[in-house]
Image (cartoon, rainbow, N blue to C red):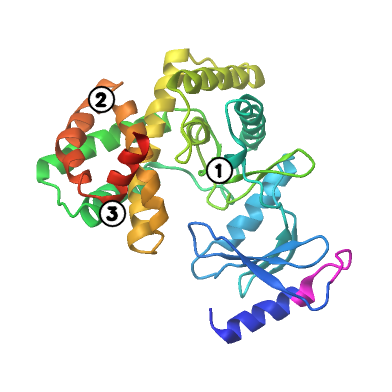
Amino acid sequence: MSNQHYQQFFDWVAASVPEAIALVEPMQIAPLAGDAGFRRYYRTNTVPSLVAVDSPPAKENNSAYLNISHALQSQMVRTPIIYAVNAEQGFMLLEDFGEQLLLPALNQQSVDSLYGQAETCLLQIQQLLPNEQIFPSYNSARLRDEMALFPQWFVGELLGSSLHQDETAMLERLFTCLVENALQQPQVLVHRDYHSRNLMLLADGDMGVIDFQDAVWGPVTYDLVSLLKDCYIRWPATMVRQRALAFKQRLLTADPGLDIEDQQFLRWFDLMGLQRHIKVMGIFARLALRDGKYSYLQDLPMVIDYSLEAARQYPEAEEFCRWFQQRISPLLQSQSWYDAAQKADL
């Protein structure tokens, strides 16, 4: 950020603080940890504090953030109150949710209560009605584009390998299956990154939702598998299945018109997770190599484990599982992030 841009941002923030918020002289803004996008976050020294966001309009869909935030709030989902917006420059002034992410609060004692709260919030999100102007369709093209990041960034750029024609054909068969699995499910609002780093525990005991600007209209299991097969924390497979089926029962209670067998729901859930984790392998590789965010590589071993665990359960993914173990796993051994993760598990 140039000095001129920072000064424009600072001046706008200082002038946009609501009257109900007490100013502290001199006005200060302190940088906060960012996310996987191009947004920069700052905390003001006002009372109470606010979060100032510099979100370049050329790189971030700020109108989607605003529209989806209002839609979620209409369903009583806690997203940060928006106090001020400069759409042209991409500046926003938001409610400060604090720093208590769900992730560090999770342990064996708290998981049932906190995940129960997160699942209740997810049910609220899924009650929203479709709106094509706000929620784009999570269609076949979008799902395929996401998975295409895997051969490009994970296999090609990160591991330095190119695919043969028969390997590309094998991936295409799998991707077709995973797209069909997604599209045959009941369609609802999908946050698209619903996990323990995007859920916050608020001072009043409520759960806050952030990073929702990429929400789409898509498969009912997508956010559930993002939560239960979280890329940053792992739970026993038995617990994950139990929670998934308990959520399914809550869905059926909320909508008696639905009729979904347990095995059907688990198949949707597991294969949806495989689609997501194939995508995430590509995204984490791209974040490291293109954006210099190398810490994401440390989370790849868990994502790989999730992928293979799901793939070996279903005949339509067995070919991918064998290929990955024979062709890709040997390439992982030379990766420092993979070795470090393996040693850490011993």
Q: Quadrant of residue 130?
A: top right
- 16 in the magenta segment: yes
Q: Which of the pair 202/59 is nearer the observer?
A: 202
Sequence order check: which comes first, mark 2 or mark 3? 3
Disc 2 marks which amino acid?
Answer: Glu
Residue at (14, 52) in percent of width and height: 162
Q: Secondary structure at mark 2?
A: helix
Quarter occupied by residue 258:
top right
What distance separates the C-alpha of mark 1 from that of mark 3? 24 Å
Helix, strand, or loop for circle 3?
A: helix
The residue tagged with tag 1: helix, strand or loop? loop
Q: CA distance from mark 2 to mark 1?
A: 27 Å
User: Could you tell whether 95 is left or right of 195 in the image?
Assistant: right
Q: Residues within 10 Å of mark 3 (few under 14, many from 20)?
A: many
- Kind of residue at badge 1: His
Q: Is residue 25 magenta?
A: no
Residue nearer the viewer, 192 or 143: 192
Point out the stretch of residues depicted in magenta.
14-23
* 140 in relation to 160, above or below: above
Quarter occupied by the C terminus: top left
Q: How many marks?
A: 3
Is residue 141 visible to us here? no
Residue at the image point whose x is 55% and y is 20% from the top: 248
- Pick whichever of labels 2 and 1 is earlier in the sequence: 1
328 displayed left or right of 74: left
Q: Give residue 191's mark.
A: 1
Q: Which residue is mark 3?
A: 153
Q: Is residue 141 left or right of residue 108?
A: left
Q: Residue at x 52, y 31 (%)?
A: 224
Q: Position of residue 291 (x, y in %)?
A: 39, 64
Q: Which mark is residue 316?
A: 2
Residue 328 seen in the figure: yes
